[in-house]
Amino acid sequence: METQPLNFEVIARDGNARAGILTTARAVIETPVFMPVGTAGTVKGIRFEELESRDLDAQIILGNTYHLWLRPGIETIKAGGGLHKFIGWERALLTDSGGFQVWSLGKLRKITEAGTEFRSHIDGALCFLSPEISMEVQAALGAEIAMAFDECAPGEATPEEARASMELTLRWAKRSREAFDRIAQVANLRSGHTEATAQVNNLRYQQALFGIVQGASYLDLRRESLERTVEIGFAGYAIGGLSVGEEKPVMLEVIEEIAPRLPPEKPRYLMGVGTPQDLIEAVARGVDMFDCVLPTRNGRTGQAFTARGKLNVKNARYAQDQRPLDELCGCSVCRRHSRAFLRHLYLSGEMLASILLTHHNLAFFLDTMRRVRQAIRSGQFTKFHREYTEQMNSGLE
Amino acid sequence: METQPLNFEVIARDGNARAGILTTARAVIETPVFMPVGTAGTVKGIRFEELESRDLDAQIILGNTYHLWLRPGIETIKAGGGLHKFIGWERALLTDSGGFQVWSLGKLRKITEAGTEFRSHIDGALCFLSPEISMEVQAALGAEIAMAFDECAPGEATPEEARASMELTLRWAKRSREAFDRIAQVANLRSGHTEATAQVNNLRYQQALFGIVQGASYLDLRRESLERTVEIGFAGYAIGGLSVGEEKPVMLEVIEEIAPRLPPEKPRYLMGVGTPQDLIEAVARGVDMFDCVLPTRNGRTGQAFTARGKLNVKNARYAQDQRPLDELCGCSVCRRHSRAFLRHLYLSGEMLASILLTHHNLAFFLDTMRRVRQAIRSGQFTKFHREYTEQMNSGLE
């Protein structure tokens, strides 16, 4: 059975920036798109109804294979009918492979050719993750987009370390591809005859696999990684291993070198990046998809993103400030609540501070991407880019 | 200027149970009513939009004078235009007097004839609260309903202690009444000529004051407190000092003795009580208004109220339970999420667990009261009371 799990079409270009439509079985996703991060099956601090609301209207969110595999565990998610059904989210999902999370454990993990041995951050139990296991777990989670199992080089890696890491990632990419295809084949055979049975079977055959380009900050390694990853062949390509300690100009240089060289007919995903400005810089260099914990994490620590830069609600200057977080924002938080009230909530340790700041920050990120798409489609992206940056740098009053 | 800050009308009776309409400048409140507790200007873990939603539709919430006075402080709330505007809530508010909160501080407070000296739980600063100060603070907060400043006797108080406490509460009730009237008079004089100026002035003249009946578990003291409180004259009457350590039958006996003896044309408010069953028992004895932290507090500790009793989501038996918290509940949480998912969120320490459990619990309490009102109006309260209790005692599957 030949099905197209994912369709992507570029509908407008403005310089290297592209606007496109990414279609999955569950959602029509306009790109460039920002994907809120739902690590443990929840985008922290926000209800799914709010993610679906007009303020945010997120069409796709992330799930973390590492976290969900350890807790609640695959058996529980399978019993719940896959990740969508378990968490109650009918729109699209992307799951990472667990590679980056395990890598982030640092001393708690040991990387071998076979895969990565590590200790669970929950109970210290010894675990093992490999390309094959990651594909099995991601198939059970049933996201529309799964990621190849990769290894990441640190920001300060030597050329030798970076090459070794890149070569391992390439071997793992091949194993990921093969494991994914075997799983898809079995799933298709099992569920093959009717659409209905395929759906029960966690939509396996509707899953698409993305490859990940690594190579640290070495452009020659990055280019080689790109070519050899594309050779293996994936439904989309990610740029991994950025925003891991390198300087910002280095990050932009890698993106500028790699993004435009990726196959133009496939979606391009920059993993784990970044601030609203980073997003726009990456869009200008040809990236289509983003995820980042900044809007949610900063929301929980009292930081709001605004059109004029970051606002720290703890600041005493906001004690009696009756203005909304962002005077240019139309989200439900900015329509209703003052900086003074949000500061009070934050200083009182009230959960509502996190809830409201998370909502505003996600609204801000998602609205920025809406405006980016509109600018590309109307051929105004360069102007938008300049004005957005100027306003961002103008500072808060 | 003579204005009616509060209007109350009993529209149906069924035994001692009554259904009524409480009208304030901002809300039409059907009674019996449950008022969610918004201690520090937020009902913990829930957005105001959700309080207003069809699931909950809370017409009135509480604010705590003690907490708001200490943080953010009256100057900040005044600068924000009063409590309604500061927090962004246009429906009705009731503020307690701070008496109970200060009393709860235990060793941190010293009670004299003049008032109560205590140390702030935030920074240890020495503070002093009296009937006069409480009335000033509550006037600035600007809730539709303010409470007299009272003193509470502990559950195990001797008759002598209980009498002394009751007598002090009566003297403070008189002082509260006088201070309130002076403030209202000044406010009326100041703002007197137009409705508009009165509104700017924090709606002071639209505020109503409730008295509080004390007397621990001594019925003779309770009756005396009732008579002498009614003599002073208030817009409504509360039963205070219950649910502070006494046995449940004692609590119900006091309610049964006092509620029906309160002036029939005024609203009756049972402070700080209780479980859904407690609410219904008190309604059966003639109470109109309730507040309690149980739905919000228990929500944060993983306990859900259901038609068949309390459900602890931490319980391992729910690990793969695909049913909603309460199969009879139609709230947005029960329509969307399983026990298994909520358990996972709770065990993962995710904020969304508190958010969703709080929502369900408030929906459950508010829906119970909706059904109570309907039952009274249709003369079916006795039947409802019996069936509700039977179902509650039938236990969870």
Image (tube, coloured by chain):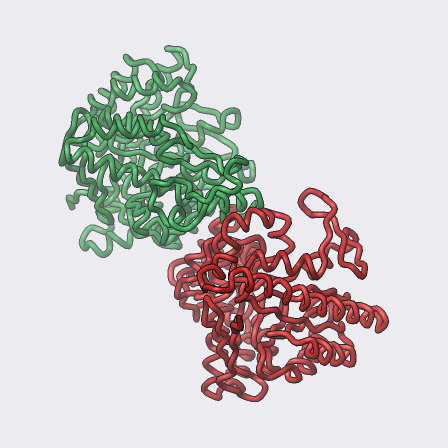
Chain colours: A red, B green
Report x, y in % for residue B49. Answer: 36, 54
Report x, y in % for residue A352. Answer: 47, 50
Depth check, front residue: A37 or B214? A37
Q: Quadrant of residue B218?
A: top left
**Is residue A384 shown left or right of residue A139?**
left
Q: Is residue B119 above or below residue A212?
A: above
Looking at the rendered image, the quarter that the C terminus of chain B falls into is top left
Report x, y in % for residue B12. Answer: 14, 33
Depth check, front residue: B126 or B261? B261
**Is residue B286 shown left or right of residue A227?**
left
Depth check, front residue: B119 or B20? B20
Q: Is residue A393 visible?
A: no
**Is residue A65 shown left or right of residue A125?**
left
Q: Is residue A172 above or below residue B106?
A: below
Depth check, front residue: A283 or B1? A283
Q: What residue is drawn where x is 47% and y is 62%?
A: A360
**Is residue B39 shown left or right of residue A256?**
left
Q: Is residue B111 above or below residue A35?
A: above
Q: How many marks?
A: 0
Report x, y in % for residue A285. Answer: 62, 82
Q: Is residue A26 visible?
A: yes
Q: What residue is drawn where x is 86% and y is 71%?
A: A160
Farthest residue, direction top: B159
